[in-house]
Image (cartoon, rainbow, N blue to C red):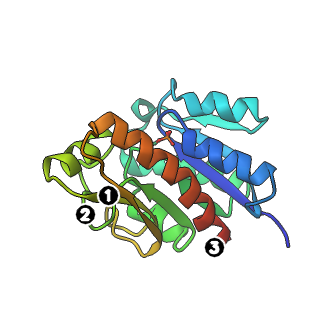
Amino acid sequence: MKKKRLVVLISGSGTNLQAIIDGTKEGVIPGEVVLVIANRKDAFGLKRAQRAGIDTLFLDPKESQSKVEYDQKIMAAISACRGEFIILAGYLRILTPFLVKAYEGRIINIHPSLIPQYCGQGFYGLRVHEAVLAHKEKETGVTVHFVDEGTDTGAIILQEKVAVLPEDTPQSLQERVLQKEHEVLIRALQKVL
Ligand code: GRF
C-alpha cells in the first residue's frame, strides 16, 4: 500500500510529532511525514523534524495580515509537498474554515481530555489538567478526532481513559496523559490511514 503523505502542524515540544516520526520510520504507521510546519520559531518539534531529515517551515503569524492569509500560506506549503493528511500535534491555532473545508476528513487533532469535556476555546496545555483536578474528576483521557469548523467538535476517531490519582498535580497528570497520547495517536493514524 502506498504511504500517505503527512504534514504535521506544531507549536511546541513536539513529543506527539516524535511519536509519529518514530511510528512512520518503524513502519507501524502507513505514512511518511513530508513537512512539519510551526507557528513558533522556537518550537522544539522543528529540531526533532530536522534531526529526522524532514523538511520544516516556520510561518510567522506576524507576517500575515489575517488568519485567512496565514492559512493560505499553510495550504500553499501543503500543496507544494503534495500533503494528503494534516495532523495537528499540539498546534495552538484554530484553522480557518476554508482550510478545514479543503482537507475535510483529512485533518486530525489530538486533545488531552475526554471530549466533550474540557475542550474548546481556552482549554489547552496545563489549563485542561488544572480544570480536571479542580472538578475532582476520577478520570480524564485522550481524544483523537477529525477537525471540523468548530473547536474540538469533529467526529471522534479514538478515545481512551486515564485515571486521575489522588496525589496528581496538573503537571503529573499532564505527563501521564501525554504518554497515553503517543499511543492513542499512533493507533488512530493506523485506523484512518
Ligand atoms: C499535547 O497535550 C496535545 O494534546 C496538546 O498539546 C500538547 C502538545 O504536546 N494539544 P507535544 O508538543 O506533542 O509534546
Position of residue 124 relative to residue 83, above or below, is above
Position of residue 156 relative to residue 107, above or below, is below
Q: Earlier in the sequence, mark 3 or mark 1?
A: 1
**Disc 3 marks which residue?**
191
Kind of residue at disc 3: Lys
Secondary structure under tag 1 reads strand
| Residue drawn 54% across the image and 46% down it | 9
Kind of residue at disc 1: Thr
Residue at mark 1 to residue at mark 2: CA–CA distance: 9 Å
Position of residue 72 relative to residue 50, above or below, is below
Residue at the farthest front position: 166
Q: Residues within 10 Å of mark 2 (few under 14, many from 20)?
A: some
Q: Position of residue 129 (x, y in %)?
A: 28, 45
**Disc 1 marks which residue?**
140
Is mark 1 in CB contact (under 8 Å) with mark 2?
A: yes
Q: Quadrant of residue 75?
A: bottom right
Q: Earlier in the sequence, mark 1 or mark 2?
A: 2
Q: Position of residue 188 (x, y in %)?
A: 58, 67
Residue at mark 3 to residue at mark 1: CA–CA distance: 22 Å
Query: Given this view, does label 1 or label 2 mark the residue nearer the observer?
Result: 1
Residue at the farthest top position: 42
Q: Residues within 10 Å of mark 1 (few under 14, many from 20)?
A: many
| Residue 90 visible in the displayed image | no
Q: Position of residue 175 (x, y in %)?
A: 42, 39
